[in-house]
Amino acid sequence: MKNTPILLPLLLILTMTSFLIVFSQAISKEVEHEAEESRYDVTEDDYTFIEDRIDGHWTVEKGMNKGEVLISVNAEKIHADRLYFRLMHDCETINVLASFLSKKENPKTENIKQLYLSTQYLKEYMLVHVPVVNKLTSEESKYDHDAWIFWLDLGWYPAEKIKSWHKNIDEITLSIQHDALFKADNYLDNKDNSWSTNGMNEAIDRAIGVCILKELNKNKEVVDN
């Protein structure tokens, strides 16, 4: 009985210590859980991946359709022309697009629905699809007359293959051929352009990261519902 006053404080200290350890572990797990939840509880408007366009440097921006991510760079010759890498929802496949602005006046341009034309991309000759030609009014184009944007679809490729093709290449060149398939000189005042590869691979990696986050968030919403 004489040891009781000594044992009670020791037991109390041990009990409190055990409680604090268990309590701190529980709090830690709760914080981790909340952090994990907040990682997925993100709406599309919360993404801050859109980058300011910089001349001669690849940047990431919103795509043409909801949920798409684009990587693009302005052309060296005519800045209005851009080369676009449209990242698909699998976060692995890239659709390569190029825009060519033309100020040449030709009444037949307005009747173009879609066409195929011959091009040379770097050292490769390619048959390219033009799915649409957009009209820019004089107010939109800021020229004295209407202008046109020819959209070239160069196909779909794995992102890693895109990187491999452009390895050790500082400048991407693309030219449209004047031939029996398409009388380019009659419709275009500029048939060739070039784009820098400055920051291209890094921009692709950033876009893939954004795409993966978007898809994880979508999957989380499906599971929760």
Image: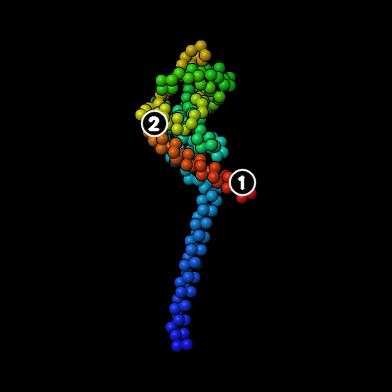
Residue 107: percent from left, percent from top = 55, 17
Q: Residue at x 41, y 34 (%)?
A: 200
In screen coordinates, is 95 left or right of 199? right
Residues 219 and 155: in front is 219
Q: What's under tag 1, amino acid-wise?
A: Val
Q: In the rendered structure, which amino acid carries the disc numbered 2?
A: Thr
- Measure the C-alpha gap from mark 2 to mark 1: 38 Å
Residue at screen point 39% across, 31% down: 197
Element class at badge 2: loop
Residue at the (44%, 38%) spot, across then down: 205
- Helix, strand or loop at mark 1: helix
Horizontally, is 162 left or right of 220 in the view? Answer: left
Q: Is residue 184 visible?
A: yes
**The residue positioned farthest toward the top in the image shown:** 180
Name the one closer to the observer, 156 or 121: 156
Label of residue 197 in the image: 2
Q: What residue would you read off at disc 1? A: 222
Query: Residue 90 appears at what percent x and percent y?
Result: 53, 36
Pointer 2 or 1: first along the chain: 2
Q: Please tell me how crowded label 1 is: few (under 14), some (14-19), or many (20+) other residues with Cα within 10 Å.
A: few
Residue depicted at 53% across the width and 23% down the height: 130
Residue 77: percent from left, percent from top: 39, 25
Which of the two discs, 2 and 1, sits closer to the camera?
1
Can you name the residue that lies furthest to the right here? Answer: 225
Q: In this orientation, which residue lies closer to the viewer: 218 or 142? A: 218
